[in-house]
Amino acid sequence: MTTIDVDALGVAVDDASYLAAGLVLVYELIVGLQHKRLRLRTFQDMFASISTTLPYLLVEIFILGFVYLGFVYVSDAWVTWSMPINAWTIAAALLACDFVYYWEHRLAHEVRLLWTQHAVHHSSRYMNVLVAFRFGPFEGAISGIIHLPLVLIGFPPELVFFGILAVLAYQGWIHTESIGRLGFLDQILNTPSNHRVHHGCDDKYLDKNYGGILIIWDRLFGTYQAEEEHPRFGLKRDFDSVNPLRVWISEWPGLFRDLRSSTSFGDALMILFAHPDWLAKQGVQRRSANAPQVQ
């Protein structure tokens, strides 16, 4: 198997993902019409999702091209051996990229600066296939750095690049309410049921089910939550806009406001790199510490 074969496989996976997402979207629209659930607001939200795709792709094409060239340079300059390209190493690369994606995705939720981008994906109060294409323009910027160790341990850059694209491509069809639970598959794969949990803003669903293709990473690292009550989708805070511009920059005003009000360099660093709710928790702790003590 050659690099050309891997490229062709990547194109086939990408095409299949768009086809699957398109079929699910058609099914969603049919079900929505039958049950009279489609409203003007639904279509406005769909448009907001689509509107994020163009700036994301413009940035992502540049970033991915830079990442691929970087992978090739590092592989040629620093890696003294490389795995062959065959069916086994393609499967191994896909598994490795899925594992790395779990941590990439988890960081996007746990580091506020990264959350400014990933929150765009979570800002919809709806759950449909078009939400799968709702991204912050710089969301993929961290991906190359996080996947670089795979190149350093000997995976050919072509396989790592294929794995990154395949993990993302898989997730198109799982953004839907129209497909219910899938039995034993829900125990292994990231399915629509598992991913609805991930998009839920209920307390029990927050920061759960980060997996890309496999959900076993969440089971291993303690972030799995089965779908129980129907999730309320969207951000935890009160955000329900379908204005594309507001969707794109939803988290930036709050971040800048908190940075301006920070009282120390250490606090500013924590605001940027700690969990998005770090400042709120600090406020609660400080108010509790300053409260009058009852004897």
Image (spheres, rainbow, N blue to C red):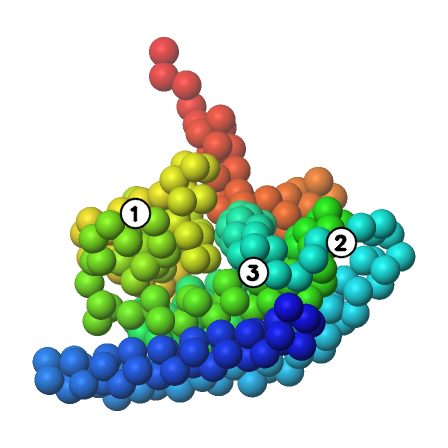
**Residue at 63% in and 48% down:** 273
Instruction: Pinpoint residue 137: horizontal percent, then vertical percent.
Output: 60, 74
**Residue at 81% in and 58% down:** 75
Where 294 sits versus 231, above or below? above
Q: Nearer the viewer, residue 18 or 268?
A: 18
Work out which quarter of the rendered image holds the C terminus and state it: top left
Where 176 sits versus 91, above or below? below
Kind of residue at badge 2: Ser
**Residue at 66% in and 61% down:** 85
Q: Which residue is mark 1?
A: 187
Which element carries disc 2, helix, strand or loop? loop
Kind of residue at badge 1: Gln
Instruction: Pinpoint residue 139: horizontal percent, then vertical percent.
Output: 59, 66
Give the farthest residue toward the left: 35
Where 55 sits versus 82, above or below? below
Comes first in the chain, label 1 or label 2: 2
Kind of residue at badge 3: Ala
Q: Which residue is mark 2?
A: 82
